[in-house]
């Protein structure tokens, strides 16, 4: 029996050793830096045959004026009787956009906003707008130069929005970046593009334009404008596209700052689960309430991320339902500016929409989608980015070598701790937490985001 026992002990020890070795090897493989994929930097995304295409590299002023007939037609559509269901008793925005508040929005849109459309249009023209062709697509961008540069260091900045936003999110943020002040040694020359298929930027005619491919377009845009090196700032898709630019083209990126830092690498996913089991190891107790465990995160996904599943699978179906349907478009988009700004707002009948925004701000954003008919093309980015081919590029496993900074606003959809970000951002030099704000800080709290961004730039000591 002793011999059998000894044999069992040896087998057990050997088994544990094998499991340890396999586990260590898998951990080492998962934590190893990924290899940059070889993407075609001249891929053609326009209509028809690339062989017949000749790129116009001119950078031209772009007039965003809207045909008055579109405004007249829109007012007519908003004047039709609203056939909305009454909300359930005692319900705010828990079931989506409350129809009582939607009636208020439509009434304001029709009777007040559109009656001053010329004023709103002039406001949207406050920055200089341009267009150039990149890889077969007519790309729109705002180019805002510093008002004065004397005694300041000037840095080019690629500033990117996400969905359901537009460049309108940045209208209060850009002047802070371009106007010198005593609080920062830097001013910024801002390039704020409309993402492909968003607003005034042309959508792809070909399949496969996901975040990695969009990052190529963004980098080519900056090179077209003469910027060999630049800083990146973004949230939502702007964060993910920006991180792809930084991962794929480290030679061009001076620094990366985001208000939605993520790590979607395999190691990042494993650490997300481990952080739920061993939170004290991954999370600073002072800010633990920012971070959702796997259970809360899963519940949040079920409650708030249904739109993403639809847009990742059938974007054209929901896009067709919203195109030329201004009331539906407003309900679908503006609802996100309630629950994504503060989840507690879903308990309010008006969704808390005017606690942080004005109707004019929200409707400016809607108008950009409406007058450009870009809701369908904007949603296709989900389908092209959340698929096997895109994941197979494994860009998320390629570390960002540039200095990085992450700002955490309490009501952001999800947060990723520094330890979870470590393998993606080995040069993370700046992390902050704010007990206010949500998914749209450039729109909601531009001064706070500006202060955080310039504090990061100071730490990065860029010249």
Image: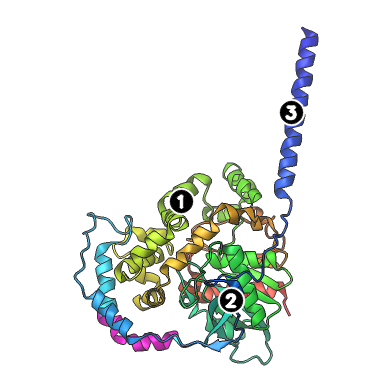
Q: Looking at this rendering, what residue extends furthest in the left direction? A: 81
Where residue 6 sits, quadrant-wise, is top right
Residue 77, how many percent across, how many down? 25, 75
What's drawn in magenta, residue-wise?
111-124
Residue of label 2: 52
Q: Are marks 2 and 3 in contact (CB under 8 Å)?
A: no
Q: CA distance from mark 2 to mark 3?
A: 63 Å
Tag 3 or tag 2, which sits nearer the N-term?
3
Residue of label 3: 16
Q: Quadrant of the C terminus?
A: bottom right
Residue 51, how many percent across, how many down? 61, 74
> Per the image, is 119 magenta?
yes
Residue of label 1: 301
Q: Quadrant of the N terminus?
A: top right
The answer to whether residue 271 is visible is: yes
Q: Looking at this rendering, what residue extends furthest in the top direction? A: 1
Where residue 326 sits, quadrant-wise, is bottom left
Q: Image point 38% across, 66% down: which residue? A: 333
Magenta stretch secondary structure, dominant: helix
Q: CA distance from mark 1 to mark 3?
A: 37 Å
**From the viewer's perspective, is residue 33 above or below residue 247?**
above
Q: Is residue 107 left or right of residue 242?
A: left
């Amino acid at each position: 029996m002793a011999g059998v026992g000894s044999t069992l002990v040896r087998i057990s020890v050997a088994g544990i050793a094998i499991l340890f070795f396999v586990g260590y090897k898998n951990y080492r493989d998962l934590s190893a830096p990924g290899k940059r994929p070889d993407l075609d930097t001249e891929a053609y995304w326009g209509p028809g045959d690339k062989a017949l295409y000749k790129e116009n590299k001119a950078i031209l002023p772009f007039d965003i004026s809207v045909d008055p007939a579109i405004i007249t037609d829109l007012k007519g559509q908003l004047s039709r009787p609203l056939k909305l269901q009454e909300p359930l008793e005692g319900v705010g925005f828990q079931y989506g956009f409350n129809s009582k508040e939607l009636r208020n929005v439509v009434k304001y849109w029709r009777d007040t906003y559109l009656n001053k459309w010329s004023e709103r249009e002039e406001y949207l023209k406050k920055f200089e707008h341009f267009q150039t062709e990149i890889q077969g697509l007519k790309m729109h961008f705002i180019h805002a130069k510093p008002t004065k540069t004397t005694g300041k260091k000037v840095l080019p900045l690629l500033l990117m929005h996400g969905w359901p936003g537009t460049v309108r999110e940045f209208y209060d943020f850009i002047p802070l970046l371009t106007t010198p002040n005593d609080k920062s040694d830097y001013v910024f020359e801002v390039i704020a593009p409309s993402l492909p298929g968003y607003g005034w930027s042309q959508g792809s005619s070909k399949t496969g334009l996901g975040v990695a491919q969009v990052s190529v377009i963004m980098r080519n845009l900056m090179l077209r404008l003469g910027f060999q090196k630049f800083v990146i700032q973004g949230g939502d898709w702007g964060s993910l596209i920006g991180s792809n630019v930084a991962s794929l083209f480290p030679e061009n990126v001076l620094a990366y700052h985001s208000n939605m830092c993520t790590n979607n690498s395999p190691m990042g996913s494993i650490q997300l689960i481990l952080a739920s089991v061993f939170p004290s190891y991954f999370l600073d107790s002072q800010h633990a309430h920012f971070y959702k465990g796997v259970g809360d995160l899963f519940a949040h996904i079920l409650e708030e991320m249904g739109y993403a599943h639809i847009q990742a699978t059938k974007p054209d179906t929901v896009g067709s339902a919203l195109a030329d349907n201004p009331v539906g478009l407003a309900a679908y988009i503006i609802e996100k500016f309630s629950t994504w700004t503060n989840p507690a707002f879903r308990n309010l009948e008006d969704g808390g929409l005017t606690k942080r925004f004005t109707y004019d701000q929200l409707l400016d954003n809607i108008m950009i989608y409406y007058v450009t008919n870009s809701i369908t093309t904007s949603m296709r980015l989900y389908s092209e980015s959340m698929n096997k081919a895109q994941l197979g590029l494994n860009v998320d496993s390629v570390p960002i070598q540039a200095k990085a900074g992450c700002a955490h606003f309490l009501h952001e959809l999800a947060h990723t701790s520094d330890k979870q970000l470590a393998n993606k951002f080995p040069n993370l030099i700046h992390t902050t937490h704010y007990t206010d704000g949500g998914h749209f800080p450039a729109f909601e709290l531009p001064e706070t985001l500006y202060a955080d961004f310039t504090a990061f730039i100071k730490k990065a000591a860029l010249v």
